[in-house]
Every structure is written in structure tokens, then in C-alpha cells.
Amino acid sequence: MTTVPHTVPLAPELEVSQWFGEPTPLESLRGRVVLIEAFQMLCPGCIRYGLPQAQKVRRMFPRVAVIGLHTVFEHHEVTGPDALEVFLHEFGIHFSVAVDRQDDHTLPATMRRYDLEGTPTTLVIDKTGRLRFVHLGQVDDLALGVLLGQLLTEEPDGPPD
């Protein structure tokens, strides 16, 4: 589990082609801790670990804003908006989901911007809008809970040096 120092620049805005649920730009969430779960609907690890954990965080940490980021880097032909809408309904995803903007590159725009290596990836942004945690793969529930608790109690200027 890798945490990022609180001195990093602000997390870049998500590059979104479509929202499912309430559009939630990161700038509108300043003052809140944000968890972004980057996933693909055909990713086994996303279905087994990433999305269920994001749903748990939404239930257990009501002060944490949870956003899904559907970032497709393979199987484009079967993972479009209609299929995603059905997937979100069938899996009971009740937080806003952004669709990563696909342009002329192989990887979607936000995935490139954040230098993500795959899915599932969990990102956590602190109250000041700084990216403080990025992890590819399964994240231990207890470790994530501790991190979220620390960030929720942190003063807006960050932890003491």
C-alpha cells in the first residue's frame, strides 16, 4: 500500500465523456475525502474486490465521496454506455460513475493523466484535493479504513510535519 505525501500537487480533474448518476467534478468535492474506484465491467478483480469495497466505503464512511471511473482499455466493442448502464443496475452500484474519455490513444484520457497501470485501481484524494493514495489490485479493507479515518480527521493543511 503506497501513500503519497501531502505535498503533491492537486489531483487532476477526471476527463469524462458521460456520467451515470450525479455529475461530480473533483473541484466540487474540495473539503471532502474522495475515493475513486477505477474499473472495467469485464475485470474479474473489479467485480470481486474493487467495486464491492467501494460500495462498503460508501456505506461505512458517509463523509467520504465515492466515485466510480469506468476506464476501458480493452474490449471496447462490448463495454459501451448501454452495457455499462445494465452492469451498474445489475451490480447495484449506487454511486456516481464517470466514463473515462476515449480519444485517439490506446488508453483513455484519465487513465493516462493519472498514469494508471490497470484495473482495479483505488485512488484516494484528501480534503484539499491532493492525490494521497493509488493502488492497483486488491486493497486490504482494514488498511484502507485506517487511511480514510486519518484523512477524515486531518486538518485541511495536512498532517503535521
Image (cartoon, rainbow, N blue to C red):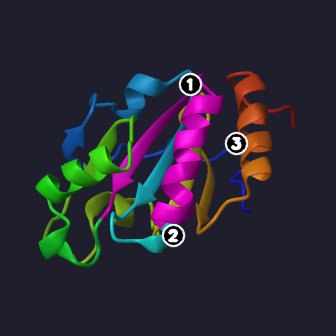
Residue identifier under label 2: 45
Q: Residue 117 or 119: which is nearer the viewer?
A: 119
Disc 1 target residue: 32
Pointer 3 residue: 6
Give the image location of residue 118, x and y in percent: 45, 73
Q: Amino acid at mark 3?
A: His
Q: Secondary structure at mark 3?
A: loop
The question of residue 14 being in magenta is answered with no
How far apart marks 3 and 1 lie (CA) works out to 15 Å
Q: Could you tell me residue 50's position as x and y percent?
A: 53, 58
Instruction: Answer with left or right where residue 92 lies relative to residue 10.
Output: left
Give the magenta part as a residue range.
Answer: 46-71
Query: Which of the 4 image quarters holds residue 9?
Result: top right
Label 2 and label 3: CA atoms lie apart by 29 Å
The amino acid type of the residue labelled 2 equals Gly
Q: Is residue 73 shown to the viewer in this render?
A: yes
Side of 151 relative to 94 (left or right) = right
Examine the rendered structure and indicate whether residue 131 appears above or below residue 115.
above
Of residue 119 and residue 48, the one placed in the foreground of this image is: 48
Q: Is residue 118 visible?
A: no
* Depth order, front residue of 82/67: 82
Which circle, 3 or 1, is nearer the viewer?
1
Determine crowd level at label 1: few under 14, some 14-19, many 20+ residues with C-alpha closer than 10 A: some
Question: Which comes sooner in the sequence, label 3 or label 1?
Answer: 3
Instruction: State yes or no: discs 3 and 1 in contact (Cβ < 8 Å).
Output: no
Name the secondary structure under disc 1: loop
Given the current orientation, which residue lies at the most extreme right position? 161
